[in-house]
Image (cartoon, helix red, strand yellow):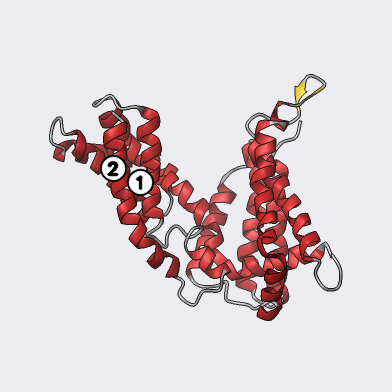
Amino acid sequence: MIDAEWLYWACGLFFLIGAGFSYRRAQYGGAAFWALLGLSFCYSTFVVNKTAPPWPLGLAVLVIAGLAGFGALGRTTIATTGQADRISAANTLRSKLFIPALMIPLVALIFGTMIVSIKVGGKPLLATGTATLTGLGVGAIVATAVGLVLLRPAGGVKLTLPLVEGTRLLQSIGWAVVLPQMLAVLGLVFANSGVGTAVGTIVSAILPKGSLLIAVILYCVGMALFTIVMGNAFAAFPVMTAAIGWPVLIQGFHGNPAIVFAVGMLAGFCGTLCTPMAANFNIVPAVLLEMKDRYGPIKAQLPTAGPLLVCNIAIMYLMGF
C-alpha cells in the first residue's frame, strides 16, 4: 500500500536543500527558516503516528513566524537564464509551454479516478484517502521530467537543474510560501474556538425575521470579507457556515445545501481576488512573474470581484431556495 507520506518527506527534503543554498550564501536567518520548515514536514509523520510529541512543531512554527516577521530571510539572487533566452524559448515552444503544467492535474485525475481502484493481493494499491495527493506528487515529478525534455537546457539534462531552479523560485517567494498553510490552520482554530457561533449570535440579533434576501447577502458578503481578512475561502467557510449558512439558510429557510454552499465558496473567492493575504493567488504570482507592482494582480482583479459577488448573491437567492 502506497501512502502519501513520501510526498511530505520529499517537500521536507526540498526545503532542507533550500536551507543548504542559503547557508552557502551566509544567509543564516534564511537557512534556519528553511531548515525548520523542512524538518517540520519530516517530523510531522511521527506526530501523526503518535510516536513523537507535537509541541516541537508548535515551537518551530513560532520560530518560523518570528524569523519571517523580523525579516531574517533577506534577499538573494541566484543566476539563471537571461530575458532574451526566455523570450527565444517561449517563441519556439509557444503553447507547448503549458504541457508540463497540465501534466500535474492530468496525472492527479488519473490517480483519483483510475489508479485508486487498483488492488494488489486483494488490498488497495493506494492508502485510503491519499489517491489525489499521491497523484499530485507523481504529477509534479512527471511534469518536471516533461519540462526537461521539452526545454532541453544548454549543457544537457541534469537532475540537479530542477533543484537549483526550484530553490531559486523558493528564495524569490520567501516567507509567503508558507502563508496558505498558516491561514488554513487559522481557519480551523477560528472554527474550533467558537468564532462561528459568536458571529451567528450577532447576525441573529440584526437579521430581520423572515428576510431571505438579507440573510443571503450577509452570508455572501461575510464569506468575501472573512476571506479578505483570512486570505483563504476555505478558512472562512467553516466560520460563516457555522454562523449563517447552516442554521439560517439551510435549517431556517430550507435551502439546497449543495447550491448554497457551492455558491458561498464562490462568494468567498471574490474576496480572494481583493486581498494580499491570499498570497498564493496574488503575491506569489507577482513575485514569480517579477512584476514591479506586487499589488498589480489585486488592482486588476478588483473590477471583477464586485460584480461577481453581486452575481453570486443573485444566483444563490434565485436558485438555492
Which of the image's four quarters has the C terminus?
top left
Q: Nearer the viewer, residue 203 or 73?
A: 203
Residue 42 visible here: no
Circle 1 residue: 267
Q: Is residue 83 left or right of residue 256?
A: right
Q: Residues within 10 Å of mark 1 (few under 14, many from 20)?
A: many
Circle 2 residue: 313
Q: Is residue 132 above or below residue 65?
A: above
Looking at the rendered structure, the secondary structure element under dot 1 is: helix
The amino acid type, in three-letter code, at marker 2 is: Ile
Q: Nearer the viewer, residue 253 or 192?
A: 253
Q: Nearer the viewer, mark 1 or mark 2?
A: 2
Q: Quadrant of residue 250?
A: top left
Q: Quadrant of residue 85?
A: bottom right
Q: Nearer the viewer, residue 182 or 83?
A: 83
Residue 99: x and y in percent read 69, 55
Q: CA distance from mark 1 to mark 2?
A: 8 Å
The amino acid type, in three-letter code, at marker 1 is: Ala
Residue 254: x and y in percent read 28, 24
Residue 199: x and y in percent read 26, 41
Q: Is residue 201 left or right of residue 261?
A: left
Which of the image's four quarters has the N terminus?
top right
**Residue occupying image coordinates x 84% and y 65%:** 158
Label pair 1/2, CB-CB below 8 angstroms = yes
Q: Is residue 154 above or below residue 53?
A: below
